[in-house]
Amino acid sequence: MALLEVKNLEVYYGVICALKGISFEVNEGEIVSLIGANGAGKTTMMQSVVGLIPKKNGTVFFDGQDITKTPCHKIVGLGMTQVPEGRRIFQELSVYENLMMGAYTVKDQQKFKEDIEGIYQRFPRLAERRKQKEKDSKRKRRLLRRISTSYRVNLITRASLQRLLKS
């Protein structure tokens, strides 16, 4: 069984069809990339999967559960999140504080501490900058605020792990 399964997804903006008949599966542990031109519907697809915009037709299953009509905040609680493009982070917070914001659904504090240490081990420069609030760490904080915690599916828009590792 796929961890994330989307079947015949259709999304409209008014009378304009943005997505029609989109189907795909993502299995546990897979990294899947959606590639397309600007305006092709990549962001629309991700936003509809996580419940940010309504679906006209189609179904979305997460870990075997139908989440087609589940509100976005409940989808996050199930273990799926979207990292949006742009600078949607808390600029006044440090790297560590932004990571904490991404873990607001994690109840087990020991698990949270283990997740944070795991991120610091994978990205040592973040450990060095854990108290940093400078603008050059925006991308890292935005991305890692989402992927640092116990989410099982992370839908990432225009993220560059290569840039993350270099900066």
Image (cartoon, rainbow, N blue to C red):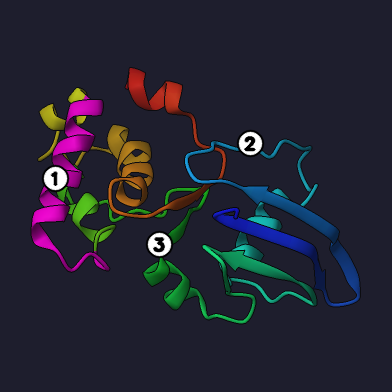
- Circle 2 Cα neighbour tier, 10 Å, few/some/many (<14 / 14–19 / ≥20): few
Distance between the alpha carbons at the discs numbered 2 and 1:
28 Å
On the picture, is 89 further left or further right than 41?
Answer: left
Q: Is mark 1 on a helix, strand or loop?
A: helix
Seen at 70% across and 49% down, the residue is: 42
Which quarter of the figure has residue 5?
A: bottom right
Seen at 23% across and 36% down, the residue is: 119
Q: What stretch is highlighted in magenta?
A: 104-123
Which quarter of the figure has residue 65?
A: bottom right
How many marks can you see?
3
Which residue lies under the disc numbered 1?
114
The kind of residue on which mark 2 rests is: Ser
Which residue lies under the disc numbered 2?
33
* Disc on res. 79: 3
- Circle 3 Cα neighbour tier, 10 Å, few/some/many (<14 / 14–19 / ≥20): some
Q: What element carries label 3?
A: loop
The kind of residue on which mark 1 rests is: Glu
Q: Disc 2 vs disc 1: Cβ atoms closer than 8 Å? A: no
Question: Percent x, y for residue 83?
Answer: 46, 51
From this view, report whether residue 150 is shown above or below residue 95.
below
112 in magenta: yes
The kind of residue on which mark 3 rests is: Gly
